[in-house]
Amino acid sequence: MATDTPLRPADSAAFDDDRSSQSRPAPPAFGWAPRLRRLIGIEEGLLAWVPEERPRYTWYGALVVNTALLGAVSMVLALSSFRSDLPLAAVLVVAVLWFWVILALDSWLVSSTHGTAVRKWTLLVRFFLSVLLGLFIAEPILFQIFDKEIRQEIAVGNDQKVADYRGMLVSCNPTDGASTTGRPECARYQLKVAGSPAELARQIKSNGDRAAALRTQVADINKTLNDKLDTEQRLCGPKYWIVRNGVRDVTITCERARKATSEYEDNSKIRTYEEQLKGLVAKGQQLSARKDEAADEYQPLLQKAVDDKTRRRAADLDTDGILTRAHGLKEVAKSDGFALFLTIVLHLLLLCLDAMPVLAKVLSGATSYDTLLGARHRTSRRLYAEELEVQHTCARLEHDVRRHRVQLDTADRMSRLDQEHQRAQAERAAAERAELEERMERIMRTRGANTPV
């Protein structure tokens, strides 16, 4: 019968001449190939209708795994170059995690391109993401390829930086100790070395200025003090003596002059100033002696300070940082045309390898599997829309049934309520009639008892 004939899609016929050797769907596949295809979101049940697409998607999955492996190798190279202090176990753990990240990202990028509904601009966006990812993966590999040249360029550049730094130190710190504060370019290169001739000269000048000022102050105090002493001697001389109780004595004016002289001598601190002046004079003599010897002692101290600063500068320069190595790679490419050519070619090659999963989809276009997947998507959407319509119809009918049930229940309850209301009214009317008859009977008995015989 016609109904016993199994249904097959239009493309289920084999592509070769021997139609009996191939059937649709094909038997399920086993081994590592289905696992590779599962990584990129291929459904084996649907692929069984187009088994000739199996090799394409198997190698497609292999491309994704190869890209993730390349990313893991790149991460190992990067950590080994930039963080050589990390233990091997930590490097392997980070590489495995990075392998999983790249694998998951590429699997999502590829699996989201299946089906004929994928637009070209979405493929371009995915390709752009793949290129960004490829740049991150490619750089550590390029650093390893040009490792020798990069290290040589970094060493030459660091030597030049050290030489320039030492030249600025020598220029900004002359052997005679002259000040270079007036030179803006020397603001970061001035050294503080004790005992320079210029520093000693500045100290001698400062000490001399302080001694001169103090000497002038002491001279003024001594002049005032001498004037007070002269006044005291004059007022206390025999010429001004008086006879008191038969004895010659000085006058009150003499005693006041003596008191004023003593108070001025104490308040002016002339003794302290004279001691300070002696100290400044002695210090000036010491500084003058040191200045004579500083010419021979300062130059070795300055040379040692310059050597120490240069040594610390050389130790602080980076040799393995990612930015330093990137700058070194740029300088290598700029210095040699062939190196620039190799750098560009290797960049493009590694970018193509890293972006190959999405690039292969862009180049291959829609496949038979994509056509079937697109048809199934459209059918699924149509079936889902019909299912929603059926559910809506069933829900509407169910609501109609529930509404009718509620209406019938409401009418039944209203009928029962009416009957109960009528019964209650009849009972009240009967009770009222019985009460009236009883009252009437009671009244009649009362009247009958009151009637005279």
Image: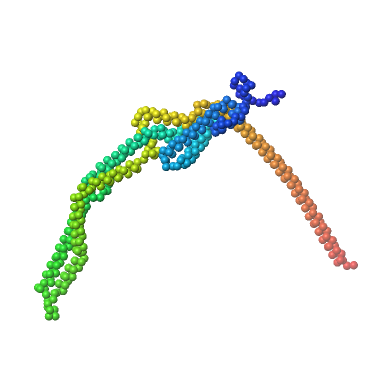
Residue 229 in the image, given as x and y percentages of width and height: 14, 67
Left or right, residue 145 beside residue 34: left
Residue at the front extreme, as displayed: 88
Choose between 291 and 415: the one closer to the eye: 291
Between 75 and 255, the one lying in front of the other is 75
Q: Quadrant of residue 152?
A: top left
Residue drawn 79% across the image and 54% down it: 427
Residue 130 place in picture, x, y as percent: 47, 33
The quarter of the picture where residue 186 lies is top left
In the image, farthest residue toward the right: 453
Estimate the x, y position of residue 53 in percent, counting from the top left: 56, 26
Question: Which residue is pictured at 71% across the width and 41% down the height?
Answer: 404
**Viewer-side residue, 279 vs 405:** 279
> Residue 170 location, x and y as percent?
26, 42
Q: Given the current orientation, which residue lies at the most extreme top position?
A: 17
Inspect this view and state whether residue 204 appears: no
Instruction: Report the colour scheme.
Output: rainbow
- Using residue 161 as the reference point, say whether residue 378 is left or right of it: right
